[in-house]
Amino acid sequence: MSDEIEAAVSFLRQKIGAAPRLALVLGSGLGGLAEEVEDPLTIPYSRISGFSVSTAPGHAGALVCGKLSGRKVIVMQGRFHFYEGYPLERIVFPLRVFRALGVERLLLTNAAGGVNPGFSPGDFMVIRDHINMTGWNPCIGQNDERLGPRFFDMSRAYSPALRGLAHRAGEELGIALREGVYAWFTGPSFETPAEIRMVGILGADAVGMSTVPEAIAAAHCGLETLGISCITNMAAGILDRPISSEEVLEISAARRPEFSALVRRVVDLIA
């Protein structure tokens, strides 16, 4: 793994020069923000050693390097998921490459189902904490001290300081932000109503199929992390109707202008 990280870092340094301090991971239906990157250099994942191929709908599968609101950023236009059949070390591989490049902060985004009955489709939720419902962890196995320590703290996996900046950005833009706990299931099936009742009792406000492995790996390697969910649907059993991936992408697309404005302002404030 370390040899592959070094190979990817060497390749990217040749392409982009000095690394940005901020990386963004764009979730389902949110990849359109990458089209707003100024002076973009787009590199398909297939060209980067160690990167996997995105197969999920709404994930373009490219790394976009350039400027957002005048700030240099590196953007993952789509991510990898456990349900695609990739081992967790492959899912988090890009984040370890970013850290080795010199990235210091990470913005994770996703499309999520609302568990909290006070939420509505189209809401944005700042992730305060998560619940790992899978039992899987990307740091299982032999530890490489160059990546991070064997045992590491998760109590501040989602930076309080960055969460504060996100709320400030929302207030300035007039975009109401929720804050809550995100529960991770593997997918690809949506959760059952019973599972949603369970995680609601446990304290989850939203549920999805990504983000948590990345947040764990980010905490391991020292990336200061902010997570934002776009609530694209109410989870199973909250409303008396089935859930579809088309609904997820439709709501994500409808909220793109507000999402774009929010992320741009967050980037400004972080910088």
Image (spheres, rainbow, N blue to C red):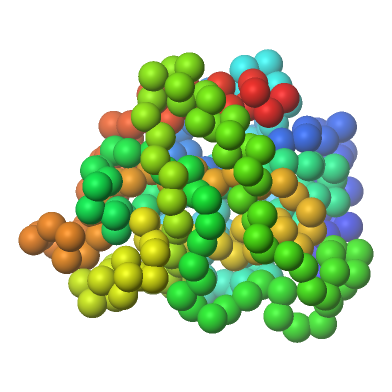
Nearer the observer, 241 or 88: 241
| Rendering coords of residue 250 (x, y %) | 26, 41
- Going by the image, does 48 lie left or right of 264? right
In terms of image quadrants, where is residue 41? top right
Outermost residue to the right: 146
Nearer the observer, 40 or 253: 253
Residue in the image at 63% along x and 27% along y: 267
**Residue 100 visible in the shown view:** yes
- Going by the image, does 60 lie left or right of 87? left
Looking at the rendered image, the quarter that the N terminus falls into is bottom right
Nearer the observer, 14 or 179: 179
Outermost residue to the left: 240
Residue in the image at 63% along x and 37% along y: 162
Compared to 150, does 229 lie above or below?
Answer: above
- Going by the image, does 141 lie left or right of 269? right
**Residue 51 visible in the shown view:** no
| Rendering coords of residue 37 (x, y %) | 59, 24
| Rendering coords of residue 247 (x, y %) | 23, 48
Looking at the rendered image, the quarter that the C terminus falls into is top right
Compared to 164, does 199 lie above or below?
Answer: below
Residue in the image at 79% along x and 42% along y: 103
In terms of image quadrants, where is residue 206? bottom left
| Rendering coords of residue 191 (x, y %) | 29, 71
Question: Number of callouts in the render?
Answer: 0
- Going by the image, does 56 lie left or right of 215? left
